[in-house]
Image (spheres, grey):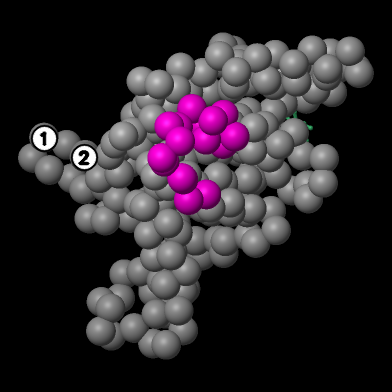
Amino acid sequence: MNILQINSSARADGSHSSRLAGSIVERVQASLDDSTVPAITVRDLGRTPHPELNESALQALFTPAEQRTPEQAARVALDDALIDELKAADVLVLGVPMYNFGVPAPLKNWIDAISRAKVTFQYTANGPEGLLKGKKVYIALTRGGQYRNTPSDTQVPYLRTVLSFLGMTDIQFIYAEGLAMGPEAEQRALASAQAQIDELALAEAVPA
Ligand SMILES: Cc1cc2nc3c(=O)[nH]c(=O)nc-3n(C[C@H](O)[C@H](O)[C@H](O)COP(=O)(O)O)c2cc1C
């Protein structure tokens, strides 16, 4: 059993999304039987950002492996490491703040790195097929305002679309909203998010 936690807040200390993601990991751990000791990997994209998908990275990716320069091979290897880490995970937990109505840029860079044709998805005669199957995904969303179930919430449809495209269709979202709407609203939002975590239906969700 491998659990992969990905934090994407720019904040090293005081990040609500990273803390809630950690709380989800603890909840998953607590749901396991005593004989199962999970391996937990925490990747903090704020502390160790992944490079963006720029022109030289694209050139490296589209150059056949045996023809890559050492620099190109090194760039592709960075993406390979993220793909291998994700492939090995049974459970993926994402901490995702809302930044200017979207996901943090480091998380977008991570998504660009893990989305690779013929490795994590492929096109067949029937259309696209995600190759990262059998994973359970939990996503802790933190927002200063309140956007759940509104057209301004582009994060949820985006994350659902791209993760499902890669084969990760079993996704549960945990919301902490209104964090910038005063201390009382903040406390209510965090208590609500923790309650959502406490109530997660894990028994049926965690792979054996
Ligand atoms: C640069 C920046 C942009 C933000 N943009 C939004 C936004 O578009 N909508 C919103 O509701 N909150 C926005 N916020 C508030 C954050 O979503 C909120 O503070 C959240 O708790 C940050 O996550 P963290 O606690 O994990 O760092 C923004 C915060 C920052 C720093």
Which residue position is annotated with label 2? 129
Question: Mark 1: few, some, or many residues within 10 Å (few <14, many ≥20)?
Answer: few
In this view, 96 is above or below 151: below
Q: Which residues are magenta?
A: 25-40
Q: CA distance from mark 2 to mark 1?
A: 8 Å
In the rendered structure, which amino acid carries the disc numbered 1? Asn
Answer few, some or many: residues within 10 Å of disc 2's Cα (few below 14, many 20 plus, some between 14 and 19): some
| Quarter of the rendered image showing ligand 1 | top right
Q: Nearer the viewer, mark 2 or mark 1?
A: 2
Q: Are marks 2 and 1 in contact (CB under 8 Å)?
A: yes
Residue 12, placed above or below residue 171: below
Task: Classify mark 2 as within 8 Å of ligand 1 or not, answering yes or no.
Answer: no
Please name the residue shown 64% across and 45% down the image.
8
For the residue pair 180 and 190, the one nearer the viewer reads as 190
Residue that numbered label 1 is attached to: 126
Q: Is residue 3 visible?
A: yes
Q: In the image, what residue occupies the spot 53% across and 52% down?
A: 41
Location of residue 92 in the rendering, given as x and y in whole percent from the top left corner: 46, 40
